[in-house]
Image: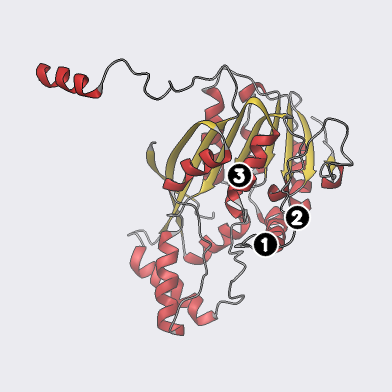
Amino acid sequence: MRRAARSLSLLSGGSAGRTWSPSLFARGASEAPEGARLCFSTDGGDGSRVKIFDRDLKRKQRDRAAWLMRPSDCFVDSVAENLLDRLEDCKKTFPTALCLGGSLEAVRRLSRGRGAIQKLIMMDMSSDMIQQCKEREQDKPDKNIEMLHVVGDEEFLPMKESSLDLVLSCLGLHWTNDLPGAMIQCKLALKPDGLFLAAILGGETLKELRIACTIAQMEREGGISPRISPLAQVRDAGNLLTRAGFSLPGVDVDEYVVRYKSAFELIEHLRAMGETNALQQRIPILKRETALATAAIYDSMFAAEDGTIPATFQVIYMTGWKEHPSQPKAKQRGSATVSFNDIQKQFGNES
């Protein structure tokens, strides 16, 4: 696991593809072609799952973000670049890839032939986001990649089992109510020796805003309410990959410090990324005086000499492979021929 801190400044100053409805994918098992299996959830839709996030609200936020997002966002581009860099470490090629939600446009724009992707399926729960991706692709088409567009939900992945070589998700999966379930569906959709790559926001994200908002609410309202969504901790990421059944799991972390002119500019950037609060148990309206107090406390506690304020984004990168006989495997327990005691004695004698 590696940790890095990066500082960014966000001061203001081919073919058209096709859009596919999830109904073309997520059919019942009895309606699927012979031999085909689908990767969506089988919980029966009875509402028994714990729902942390309001997925309908998140879809609306994604619709809004489609029209607010910047042509180039240095934070989002940095995360997408680091995620795609991992494909250069692989000798294997990935002809068919799926990109799930999050920063779709950044992944498409920055792929630049990495992974030898021939067909890239762009999927998002927001039809407006998919439309924006299609329009931007028309402006700058990539003739080497066949682009397909799907309106679908990461929680009910509308893909056939063992149909993909690569599943990518850049800043999208942390909004799912059942992250392990979504990752299991990704694994089912992968072919043997297929690769899963994801970047999600970690628990240290926006720690400055959390502190400022908590203090402001205590001062103005006499209590606190959930204003910022809960996020996975680094220690959980490896367990998530193992629980989903991926082999050769890998986790590493980057921290990005982005500087803004004010807390209000930070909020505008979060809206443009579709990263605003979508908690099921949220308080819908933040009082104006509490919002102003939050901005003032943020500035007084964290502002730099130049007047800008920092916002920390912790990004957790997860890598996992679908099992295949060619992959290295751990030796059977008890098969070692040298004990750790012997190794310790040898190195102890040398020192």
Q: Secondary structure at mark 1?
A: loop
- Image check: 124 left or right of 170? right
Q: Secondary structure at mark 3?
A: loop
Q: Earlier in the sequence, mark 3 or mark 2?
A: 2
Question: Can residue 172 be seen?
Answer: no
- Image check: 68 left or right of 295? right
Label pair 2/1, CB-CB below 8 angstroms: yes
Q: Secondary structure at mark 2?
A: loop
The label on residue 44 is 2
Q: Label 3 amino acid? A: Ser
Residue 306: image location, x then y, percent: 36, 58
Of tags 3 and 1, which is closer to the observer? Answer: 1
Q: Earlier in the sequence, mark 3 or mark 1?
A: 1
The label on residue 72 is 3
Give the Cα distance between marks 3 and 1. 40 Å
Residue for badge 1: 48
